Amino acid sequence: MDYVVILQWITINLITIWLSAKADTEACQNGNISVSRASVIPLGSTVTISCSLTPGAGCIGRPNHLKIYQRNYKLLATQKHSSASVSVRVTELGKTAFTCYFSCNPNSEDKTLFCGIYTEVGTSPGQPKNLTCEQLGEQARVGCTWEKGRNSYINTTYLLELQNETDSVSSSFSEYWNSSSFGFLHLPTSLVPASNYTAIVTASNSLGTAVSSSFQLTFIDVVKPHPPSHLLLNFHNSSSTSCTVQWKDDQETQIFRLKYRPESHEFWRMVMVENCRRYDLHDLEPFTNYEFQISGKFHITKGKWSQWSSSVLRQSPEAVPVGELDVWYLLHPVDSETRIVTLLWKNMSLSEARGKIRHYKITVQKLDQVQWNITTQTWFVKTIDKTACKITVSAYNARGNSPPTTISIAQEDVSGLPSPHNAWAVAMDNGSIFITWDPPGKLLDLVKAYVVEWAELPDKDRHNLNWVKVPASMQSTLLTGNIKPNWCYSICVYALSEKGAGVASCTRGYTKQAAPLSGPQISWQQRKENSVLVSWEDIPANQQMGCIISYKLYLKKRNSETVPKVFEIQSETFTKPYILERISTGIVYGMWMTGSNAAGESPRGNKEFIFLNVGNVSRWYMNIILAVILSCTSFGCIYFVQPIRQRLLSLFTTNVKIPDPANCTWAREYMSVKDKRRLPSEQFLNDSGIFEEPETMDIEEVAGCNEQLTFTYTGTFCNGECNTNMHFQTPEGNCQPQDLNTTTVDGFIYKHQVPCLYKNLVSELITLQTMSQQDIEPADTSVVNYLPINMLSTSINTTDDGCESQAELCSLMTFLPPLFSYDGKLTLDAVKIDCSSFTE
């Protein structure tokens, strides 16, 4: 009974295993899906996919329509049942998915997923090839590498086996074929030097197995030594070309290889060293950084080389420079006796300098005089006479100096020295300039070499000039380095002889051109009746975009539709300013300018308007005439306007001499009259604000003055005779003070104001004047207490002798207004005296 049960259990398990091997099923909530084969399917085989719904699932009351898809987009079958199946041939490698859907309406796109399954499609593994093994060092584990072969797209197991005469070890790993086409395994052992080994790799998956070829190996074949260490270098007696290389190695290494190179080079030099751990190197370059590496192996003829050791960098010592400096010069005259020479030279290459250049020595030799200077720059400036001389330049490092480079500088006149002709520059496609020239004629045998120099236009930088020396046998060269596109260069060719460089042949060149980016800025000035001088500023160098070959000046009438006149100015012949002739007067012209190179014309620059007046008085002359007119007007105002002239004279005059009235005859007579009040002139010359009030006296009032009195007095400076003219006018109206005419005495102008008087004052003045003329003394002297009669009679006397001196005035009337009296009494309120006029 027990045997029957055991037999049934075995039978059921065998059937289950067989079914599992033959089919794969995925159960879902609403149904299931199965594949007729296992989940791993060989490429190109045919499989059956079956779908079925669980009873009660799917459409209710309507039939189910089942659909089977591959990769969710490829429809394999549609059936109107609760189950469906389809057979399909698998032609796509890798993982693939089969899915089952049901739909209640076959005409609708709606469907419901109820189950799915993933399968793998692959191939059997490829055969492993090129099996190699390696062991790093004597005690390390051995590792083997092989090529996997083709990709099986399914999980594959790799088994590495290593066996010798007595023992066998193995190691394995499983993986999907990934991007790496190589397999690698370490074995848990190290090789023994006296044994022979065989290695095999087996690849297997569910679809097949593949075995590599066997690989025979020994300890010498497989084991790789560790790289040597402690690489040391020693230069003998500070030698710059020889050194000894030493290293350490504690293994049974029999042969080494040493490689070295200058750090800047790409290729290595290599030497072999057998059974020795040192080597002497020769023919090294001085003052050069070298890189050294070394490796080794156990056997001379077979085995594996070790990895290269870490690099060791070492600089060789300096040596005496061997190259000559490339020297050139520029001359600049100072005066008739001296000139400035600027020496320029290029840095030596490392192979020529053979060390760090510390300074340069310059020697100037003329006749029996020798001068030397030291500099660390690559240029030197010195003032020399205008005589022939020789200059040498040498470079110095820590070990010595280079051979001196000698240049000869001729006297000021170099017309007799050989000179090239017809220099011509052509742009090349590679960003260089090709220049050619004709050699000197009869003096060709005297030429030692040519020097071609080039510099950016318009300015030359003395210390950044470019030049190249060309052998005397050549008449052309290619200029490269420090040349920018869209830029104009000045290029000069010199012929060198024993006596120096002659006159240069110069031209202009470029590597690439474009139309200028801007135009010249112009200005103008009238020259004569119908011509102007036009000046302009050159286009900035960075906007010329090449070499300017011509300028165009445009002239057009304002608001005119006619084509403008064009005046072309060639760059080889143009001069500034440019004279523009035959410009019509009275017309406004617009004027502008452009610049052109070989690639095109620039935009126009600023626009100026020209207008020439009829008669053509230039701006400069107009300014002079206006200045003269303004000067004359200012002088006339100062001379003829009294207040301005007085103010200016007061600035330059400190003491003003005023004539003394006491020197006149009337003043002396007045002083002799008894009981007459002295009336000093100083009272009238002082400020009116401090004028003292005279004593009062009884004067009979008379009727008010209703008429205006105008009194004009003219006092004349005379020689020998005094003349006085008085005019009286008493029009009707109110009596108001009025200004007198101005009086000029000894160059000064005095202004007086007539007091406001009554009418009877005028009549009394007339009476007193008559009495004075008849030598009759007035009877009533009480009135003279305020206005003395004697002063009046004296002031109007025209028969007295004149002035005692030409520098004095004839009468006090020059300073005071004429005083007078009339019948009746004079009251004080009828007399109004304004003294402010005297101070003016």
Image (cartoon, grey):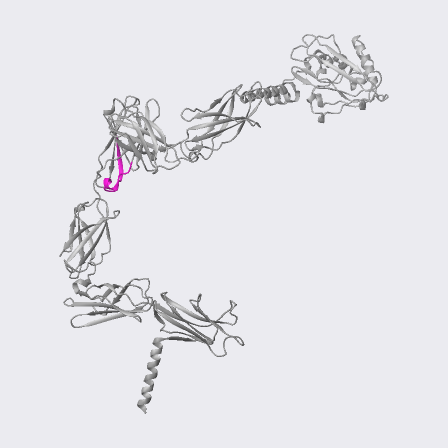
**Res 443 quadrant in image:** top left
Horizontal side of 166 relative to 608 (left or right) equals left
Q: Foreground residue, 219 or 153?
A: 153
**Res 360 quadrant in image:** top left
State the image coordinates of residue 180 (x, y, percent, origin top left).
31, 62
Question: Is residue 349 magenta-colored?
Answer: yes
Q: If the image is split into quadrants, where does the N terminus sit?
A: bottom left
State the image coordinates of residue 54 (x, y, percent, origin top left).
47, 78
Q: Is residue 382 at all visible to an observer of this figure?
A: no
Q: If the image is split into quadrants, where does the C terminus sit?
A: top right
Q: Residue at x 20, y 56 (%)?
A: 295
**Magenta part of the chain:** 346-363
Question: Is residue 380 magenta-colored?
Answer: no
State the image coordinates of residue 749 (x, y, percent, origin top left).
67, 18
Horizontal side of 114 relative to 393 (left or right) equals right
Q: Is residue 642 above or below residue 354?
A: above
